Image (cartoon, rainbow, N blue to C red):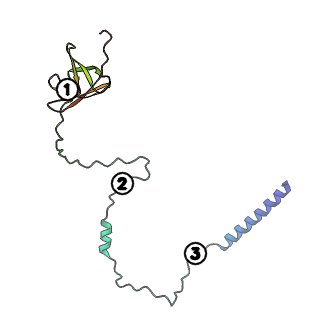
Amino acid sequence: MTRRTQFIVLGVLLAVLAATAFNFYRRGYSSQEDTPQPVSLNAKFTPLSVDNPALRLDILKRFLALEYKGVHRSIFSATLPLPPAPPPSKQVIVAPGPPPGPPPLTVDAKYFGYVSDFGGNHRRAFFATSNNEDVIIAGEGDTFMGRFRVVRLTNTTADVEEVSTGRRATLTLEEPSPTG
């Protein structure tokens, strides 16, 4: 836009503003124009039929007596409310459990080898006493040390059962020490 066009547009806008202000102040405000005019009632209007138009005070009292039982939290606070207190714990008496079972079986011997016949049907195990002085040779079903029975023999384990209680233990094959 040129400078001359800008002055013409400015002049037109000032003229419109002046005309609007003159019209606004010429009329002025009177209190009669601000009050609403009464509305004529329609002759066809009939109010609703209500049996008892009295206020139900019993229902109102019931609603007024209600209290909010939820969490009271400010919606304007970013922090979380404290968790509710835990209910008082009731002391529960726990019945005693079953008595503990027998202790695991300990065998005072080491399984340190086995031998089998040519067919591999009959195996015999070598057991050494705890002081390594006596060597006991027993096959499957044999009793050794007066109270243990050999139940099963494999290449790496010997399953042993205590004759009096029936408790079982598994002895693993122990390699002989290099010193002898």
Dot 1: few (<14), some (14–19), or many (≥20) neighbours within 10 Å? few
Nearest the viewer among 120 and 106 is 120
* Pointer 3 or 1: first along the chain: 3
Circle number at residue 34 = 3
Circle number at residue 142 = 1
Residue 168 against residue 72 in the figure, above or below: above
- Distance of mark 3 from mark 1, alpha carbons? 122 Å
Nearest the viewer among 94 and 36 is 94
* Pointer 3 or 2: first along the chain: 3
Dot 3: few (<14), some (14–19), or many (≥20) neighbours within 10 Å? few
Residue for point 84% across, 58% down: 5
SS category of the residue bearing label 1: loop
Circle 2 residue: 72
Q: Specify the amino acid type for callout 1.
A: Asp
Q: Specify the amino acid type for callout 2.
A: His
Position of 47 compared to 90: left or right?
A: right
Based on the displayed image, in which of its 4 quarters is residue 58 positioned? bottom left
Q: Specify the amino acid type for callout 3.
A: Asp
